[in-house]
Image (tube, rainbow, N blue to C red):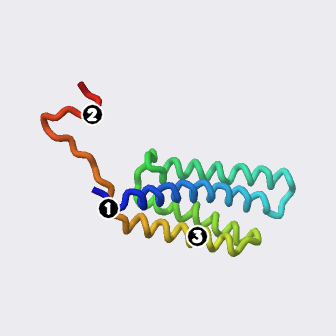
Amino acid sequence: MNARPGFTQANLLLVFLLELGALAALGYAASTASAATAARVALGVTVPVVAAALWGLFAAPRARFRLPAARLAVKVLVFGSAGLGLVLSGHATSGITFVAVVLLNALALRLAPPREQSVPTPGVPARGVA
């Protein structure tokens, strides 16, 4: 049994919020590029959509392609680009803080005890099965 289920659940919630924050930061940073207004709008929409598509394909819990190296690469790319984008758009403290929270959260999840997997007992019907 997990000794600290609340701690793990809170960190998983933080992961989700960081993922949303990364998409927002990417959109913001892309929209502040020194380009024409139409290009900034296009970048502000396209960059987070591409990041979300890559995340869905390689880094999401139910990703279509379950390749550990690709998962790590996409996470580093998305979170790192979000932090760098904030720094380059004039929000250095926010960018550095964002990346630091991502790293601390990843470390906390790595050090947390593994989630308990329910193993069916032979001869005992599963819950809800009559």
Q: Looking at this view, is 69 or 113 the one in front?
A: 113
* Residue most extreme to the right: 36
Q: Quadrant of the C terminus?
A: top left
Horizontal side of 67 relative to 49 (left or right) equals left
The amino acid at mark 2 is Arg
Q: Looking at this view, is 82 or 125 the one in front?
A: 125
Residue in the image at 55% along x and 69% along y: 101
Upstream in the sequence, badge 1 or badge 2?
Answer: 1
Q: Check disc 1 and report the residue beneath it.
A: 3
Q: For numbered disc 1, what is the local secondary structure?
A: loop
* Residue most extreme to the left: 123
Horizontal side of 129 relative to 63 (left or right) equals left
Upstream in the sequence, badge 3 or badge 2?
Answer: 3
Residue in the image at 67% along x and 59% along y: 26
**What is the crowding at mark 2: few (fewer than 14 residues within 10 Å), some, or many (at least 20)?**
few
Q: Check disc 2 and report the residue beneath it.
A: 127
* Separation (CA) of disc 3 from disc 1: 28 Å
* Separation (CA) of disc 3 from disc 2: 42 Å
Q: Check disc 3 and report the residue beneath it.
A: 99
Horizontal side of 126 relative to 78 (left or right) equals left
**What is the crowding at mark 1: few (fewer than 14 residues within 10 Å), some, or many (at least 20)?**
few
Horizontal side of 25 relative to 114 (left or right) equals right
* Separation (CA) of disc 1 from disc 2: 24 Å
Residue in the image at 64% along x and 48% along y: 49
Upstream in the sequence, badge 3 or badge 1?
Answer: 1
